[in-house]
Image (cartoon, rainbow, N blue to C red):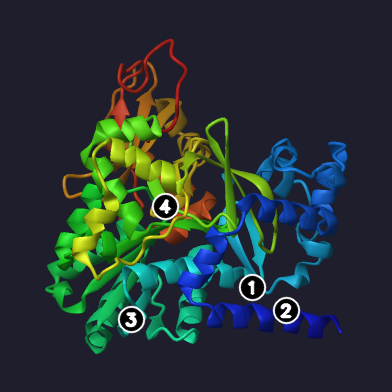
Amino acid sequence: MKHKSRGQQVIKVWEDFVSTPLEDLLQQHINSSGESAVLDLFHDVAANVPAYQAFLAEREIQPDTIESWGDFQKIPAIAKENYISRYPLADLCRNGQLEGCDMIAASSGSTGKPTFWPRFFTDELQIATRFEQIFHDSFAADTKPTLAVICFTLGTWVGGMFTTNCCRYLASKGYPITVITPGNNKEDILRVVQELGGNFAQVVLLGYPPFLKDVIDTGIARGVEWQRYQMKFVMAGEVFSEEWRSLVGERVGSQNPCYDSASLYGTADAGVLGNETPLSICIRRFLAQNPEAAKALFGESRLPTLVQYDPVSRFFEVQNGQLLFSGNNGIPLIRYNILDTGGIISYDAMLQFLADWGFNPLENLTPHTQQPPRGIHQLPFVYVFGRSNFTVSYFGANIYPENVTVGLEQPVIKEWVTGKFVLQVKEDTDKNRFLSVVVELATDVEGSEDKRQTIATSILTQLLRLNGEFANYVPKEYQTPQITLAPMGDREYFPIGVKHRYTRK
């Protein structure tokens, strides 16, 4: 009987997805109250998820006393440390049943030990709407035969399989999209595009930004005529500059940066939380040209990822400069702190802010496309600076200082160094990324090329051993870190008397 009711639930959700046009769905959600939806989700999770019941009981919170939006905001946030890691995996799922999910993805933690994230088919369908926004609003893929080339790593990692499924759901909905899955195999990607791309009106590469750029540059070196294929890009996992977007666009003959690429704000924990839209890209490009406006809006002089989100699907709050979100998944999450720093801005507040700076993005988009332009939805914005817990993101892999530390603690090397280092992702003059590690030498130790290479090999060995995301996401030719040896007390990297930070953004 249980199987029958589950099947009926699937049929209903599937019918809603296939039969509801994107515009209608988003308008329904714009007209709905995000606060009301998230309160309903809280009560459902409090009634049906054993781990969350235990979490509330430990804090002496009675779910029936949480009646208003104000009550909800007082509930303690959950995070990996105080929630996900503390309870058995099954207890994090509804009714304590892991078998209620049909897919499990993995993400690596700082020790390389994976965290498992189960989900069900219906969880993927609501995320497929984020992909539909991009394929419909940005790429007009409802009107053009489209080849979607999945360049994310395949396997247990969330990007490849999740993205593949969502693109196939769009095809089932009637979009003329055909999917192929070379994963992050560069040779296969280039072969696929050249042998199949000519059969389609456009080709979409979906992957991590630095990897996609490497694919494009390798193709140019081999004489691939990217302009022939009307290339589009769907990206995730990295903050990149608008100069980067322009450079990659120019190399494939892109004519319209607001409509030829889009980035997803996604996570293994809950799928896609938000997505770039033509409107958000148009705004970000204006802010990139006007750093004073960007600093006034975001409070920092660096440009974050800027996306729009559907508060009925993923509800955001900000607490002490960190983003909390609530959303329904295989593991439902209530006020979950993913350790991303950022903020939220309503649609009206964003347009008013830009008007005060003399910019109207709606007018700016209109000349480039049909009337009225696609991709204008009155959804709120979320901006993301990235993790606040001292990781760096490289080809979508979270790299932790702890991984590098082990590389410096090996025999012989530990005699040369203090153990201090600075880990960061840098770009060369051609905007290719590389992993930089500046290492502080011990007293009276002289740097040498031999030491530099030995340290690079040791760090690489430990990264590959400890960090599954690094080993699987980062192409081999980009894995070896570039080591700089600095004397003890170096003013730029290791000033004496200052609390040391192991990462730089």
Gap in Å between the C-alphas at discs 4 and 2?
Answer: 31 Å
Label 4 or label 3, whichever lies nearer to me, is 4
Give the camera-side residue of 444 and 47: 47
Residue 189 picture quarter = bottom left
Residue at image mark 4: 307
Question: Which callout, 3 or 2, points at the residue further toward the start of the chain?
Answer: 2
Residue contact at pointers 1 and 2, CB within 8 angstroms = yes
Q: Secondary structure at mark 1?
A: helix
Left or right for 62, reference 67:
right
Q: Is residue 410 visible?
A: no
* Displayed quadrant of residue 125: bottom right
- Name the residue at 41% across, 83% down: 175
Mark carried by residue 122: 1
Asked whether 156 or 253 is in front, the reply is 253
Measured Cα–Cα span from mark 4 to mark 3: 24 Å
| N-term mark: 4 or 3 | 3
Q: CA distance from mark 1 to mark 2?
A: 9 Å
CA gap, disc 3 and disc 1: 25 Å
Q: Depth-wise, is mark 1 or mark 2 nearer the camera? A: 2
Residue 192, image x and y in percent?
Answer: 29, 81
Badge 2, how many Cα within 10 Å: few under 14, some, many 20+?
few
Horizontal placement of 358 versus 346: left or right?
Answer: left
Q: Nearer the viewer, residue 499 or 272?
A: 272
Whether label 3 touches label 2, CB < 8 Å: no
Q: Amino acid at mark 3?
A: Leu
| Residue 5 picture location, percent across and down | 80, 81
Q: Residues within 10 Å of mark 1 (few under 14, many from 20)?
A: many
Among numbered discs 3 and 1, the one appearing first in the sequence: 1
Q: Is residue 243 above or below residue 389?
A: below
Q: Earlier in the sequence, mark 1 or mark 2?
A: 2
Query: Which amino acid type corresponds to the residue marked 1 in the rendered image?
Result: Thr
Mark nearer the viewer, 3 or 1:
1
